[in-house]
Amino acid sequence: MRSHRWRSICILATTLALGGATIAVAHTEVTATSPASGATAKTSVKQVTVTFNKTLRSGTLRVTGPGGRLVSSGGGVDPRNVKRLLAGLKGSLKAGSYKASWTIAAPDGHRQKGSFQFKLKR
């Protein structure tokens, strides 16, 4: 009886460990942003990017500036790199704080969203 219980516990522990590893591996992660999250860049920045560790099914990227004003145009999967979101920035930008917000559909269809902030200076 004890060996049966011990075997059941081992099987359950192995199943949970492997199941947890599968979930961790399946999650799409941000590998880089440009400008870097929390960084200060010059107001001459022309685009914002978010790069992921996996191919994206789809996605959007919006950048807002001082006062919550939308300063990006476009904002989707980069046709030259399907692991990256790319948004062009409109006209001349003011110094201040900016927020880039993204939403993606991962390869398995799972939707994720996130954001990062950066500052621009003259």
Image (cartoon, grey):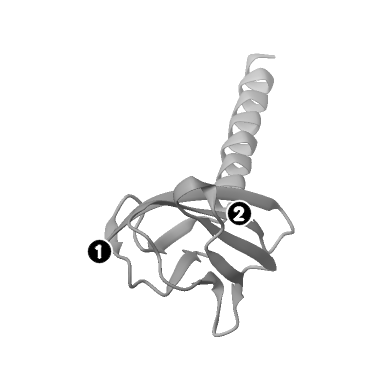
- For label 1, count other residues whose C-alpha is less than 10 Å away and answer few (under 14), some (14-19) or many (20+): few
18 horizontally vs 58: left or right? left
Which of the labelled discs sits on residue 25, or is there none?
Answer: none
Along the line of sight, the residue nearer the viewer: 20 or 111: 111
Along the line of sight, the residue nearer the viewer: 14 or 98: 98
Name the residue at 50% across, 64% down.
53
In the figure, residue 57 lies in which quadrant? bottom right
53 horizontally vs 75: left or right? left
The three-letter code of the residue at mark 1 reads Arg
Residue 17 seen in this snapshot: yes
Residue 54 seen in this snapshot: no
- For label 2, count other residues whose C-alpha is less than 10 Å away and answer few (under 14), some (14-19) or many (20+): few
Name the residue at 49% across, 46% down.
67
Q: Quadrant of the N terminus?
A: top right
| Place of residue 24 in the rendered image (x, y in percent of width and height, measured from the top left) | 55, 47
| Place of residue 119 in the rendered image (x, y in percent of width and height, measured from the top left) | 33, 53
Q: Residue furthest bottom?
A: 80
The three-letter code of the residue at mark 2 reads Ala
Callouts 2 and 1 close, C-beta under 8 Å: no
| Place of residue 66 in the rendered image (x, y in percent of width and height, measured from the top left) | 44, 50
Q: Quadrant of the C terminus?
A: bottom left
* Residue at numbered disc 1: 122
SS class, disc 2:
helix
Which of the labelled discs sits on residue 26, or is there none?
Answer: 2
| Place of residue 91 in the rendered image (x, y in percent of width and height, measured from the top left) | 46, 73
Answer above or below: position of 44 versus 37: below
